[in-house]
Amino acid sequence: MYTDKIPDIIIGRLPVYLRALQRMSEKGIRTTSSQELGEHVGISAAQIRKDISQFGEFGKQGTGYSISFLLDKLREILKVDRVWDVALIGAGDIGHALARYQGFVDRGFRIVLVFDNDPSKVGQKAGNFMVEDISKMTDMIRDCGVKVAMITVPALSAQEVSDKLIKAGVKAILNYAPISLNVPDEVHVQYIDPATHLQRMTYYL
Amino acid sequence: MYTDKIPDIIIGRLPVYLRALQRMSEKGIRTTSSQELGEHVGISAAQIRKDISQFGEFGKQGTGYSISFLLDKLREILKVDRVWDVALIGAGDIGHALARYQGFVDRGFRIVLVFDNDPSKVGQKAGNFMVEDISKMTDMIRDCGVKVAMITVPALSAQEVSDKLIKAGVKAILNYAPISLNVPDEVHVQYIDPATHLQRMTYYL
């Protein structure tokens, strides 16, 4: 139904559409238009129609989109019609916040393992998880077949942690450490760094 | 020296260059090339040269870039050659983590005000800050002239908080609530939502 050649910038907008549709669905709304969805996400109706049409004909002229149908399709395209196991490396402030965050599971993810190298944290709780020693990380991640990880360790340790994760089979890393990671082409990285996001806005002030 | 018509996608890469150069500088490195910088940030040397040349001739053929000169220029362009006061709204897990985060000040930002609507949090500490009642938010932000804010409240409250921030004069919002915000054209919003970032990667797995 669709090819692998969709531009990454379009892929990046799909989770935003999915999130808005999920919220509409929770409110009991059953159909929407590209105009209405556009107002929710701040993207033009034309762009939304173009993005979604990359994957097939999901809307009907005049009646718009069935939200549940579009939710199913977007979840299938983004492969979050399942729940991915996620490893969390780093049980500091951000790690604890993520371990306690309730918003993952209905969006396709659940944390299953938490690691830290600090002896005072190992064996303690982070959310509902027991923090494991980082020396066990490679084996445990490989044994559990975990493909997705979040790194919240200090910048100086992040590359080493990333290398070990990839060796253990991880293919997607969400990196909170304020440093760019060197990874092979087949591994995907996304970055969360509040200062970088803030600097991108101050340019315009 | 440069116009206001630089594409936003280029502006988005500048903080990444700035971060890598800052790290090199901390290691005592004084000059770099677009090749070397490219390896650090995972962007091609040609792209880096093209991005930086939008703002002037900062490198010399053969000798590369002076890191301190390029740092100064990038800070000036991104307007982080100063320190911006930031208001933090929401003193939950993520809010606490941000209030305690040490990585803002050498990148142009300092939190100055923290607000929450939960009576059990107001008057308590978040990092070094006293949590203020959200009812005082509009007045305190206006009085302090704060232009930058981070929202870490639940999704259901985020739009209302955003509206009040904008009324108080805020022009840039970093939104951690998992919802798209409706803001006027002159206000800038960046989003941090780990599930959205993860979904963008699972497409490729």
Image (cartoon, coloured by chain):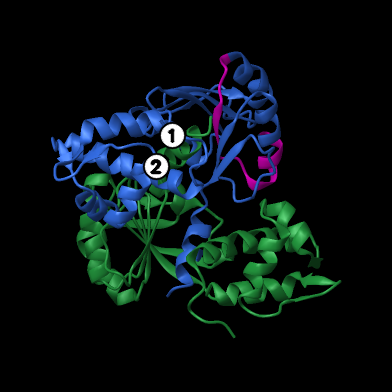
Chain colours: A blue, B green
Q: In this view, does B62 lie above or below A48?
A: below
Q: In this view, does A35 lie above or below B71?
A: above
Q: What residue type is labelled 2?
A: Gln
Residue at point 38%, 37% (across, down): A55
On residue A54, the disc is: 2
Nearer to me, B103 or B81: B81
Is A153 inside the magenta-drawn segment?
yes
Same-chain status of marks 2 and 1: yes
Q: Is residue B117 visible?
A: no
Q: Give the range drawn in magenta.
A: A144-161
Quarter of the image holding residue A97? top left
Residue at point 44%, 73% (across, down): A204
User: Distance between the Cα atoms at labels 2 and 1?
Assistant: 7 Å
Q: Position of residue B43 (x, y in %)?
A: 66, 54
Q: First in sequence, mark 2 or 1: give its number.
A: 1
Q: Is residue A169 visible?
A: yes
Residue A186 vs residue B28: left or right? left
Nearer to me, B20 or A127: B20
Chain under disc 2: A
Which residue, given by chain and number where applicable, does mark 1 sit on? A2
Is A12 inside the magenta-drawn segment?
no
